[in-house]
Amino acid sequence: MPIQGSIEEEIVQSEGNVPANIEKEAGLVETVLFLESEPLSVDVISHIAKISADIVEDCIGVLREKYAADNSGLEITQIAGGWILTPKKENWEVLKEKYGNRSEGKLSRSALETLSIIAYKQPVTRAEIEHIRGVSPDNMIRMLIERQLIQEVGKKNDAPGKPVQFGTTKEFLKFFKLNSIAELPRLDENEEERFVLAR
């Protein structure tokens, strides 16, 4: 009987290219995510763990199901196109006052306002940011570039002097735990009107 069982496992592996018992591989992927502080793509996890990308994707599915349990404080989240272990949102809401400053490094109100304008209006020029905020954004732009939250993304060719345009970076997505810009919260009516009037 043990021989028969072994043959059946080999058949499952060869047919679906997925190990019959994926728990071991899922544990390996979990360990990689625990040890790394940056979001990792499936291909990078595959390279580190020395298992195929298909198996990594299956492992992520297994781990997402595992962390979905109510007694788990963590979840596997896709951020900036990669996977990372993060606190569950409901737990983070309780703890972010203590731990948020450590990971987010505190942004001032002015920096956050400048950053939100760039995030929602990108690509955007200095003059456009100043028009919305009513004050020069130069210091905030310099600081946000140093923090790698924004970058130059080109020039506005149809404007006099072809001014530089700014947009957000992959670091911005990681900072706010977003997988893409499309996940930004919707603006409220007042904010939307303010942005529209500035165009």
Image (tube, rainbow, N blue to C red):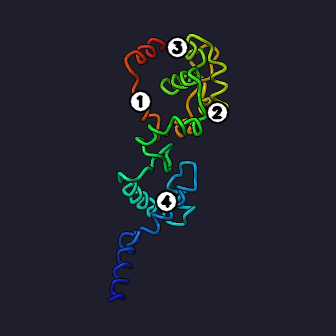
What residue is disc 2 on? 147
Say how many tags the image has: 4
Q: Position of residue 157 (x, y in %)?
A: 58, 20
Amino acid identity at mark 3: Ile
**Residue 169 as seen in the image, left or right of residue 193:** right
SS for dot 1:
loop
Q: Which residue is mark 1?
A: 185
Residue 159, position as x, y percentages in the image: 58, 15
Sequence-wise first label, 4 or 3: 4
Q: Percent x, y for residue 53? A: 48, 61
Residue under the image location 49 percent in, 55 percent down: 42
Marks 4 & 2, CB-CB < 8 Å contact: no
Q: Which mark is residue 132?
A: 3
**Secondary structure of the residue carrying numbered label 2:** loop
3 or 2: mark nearer the eye: 2
Q: Label 2 neighbourhood size at 10 Å, few (<14), some (14-19), many (20+)?
A: few
Return the residue at label 4. Answer: 30
Q: In which quadrant of the rendered view does residue 18 lie? A: bottom left
Relative to 144, residue 163 above or below: above
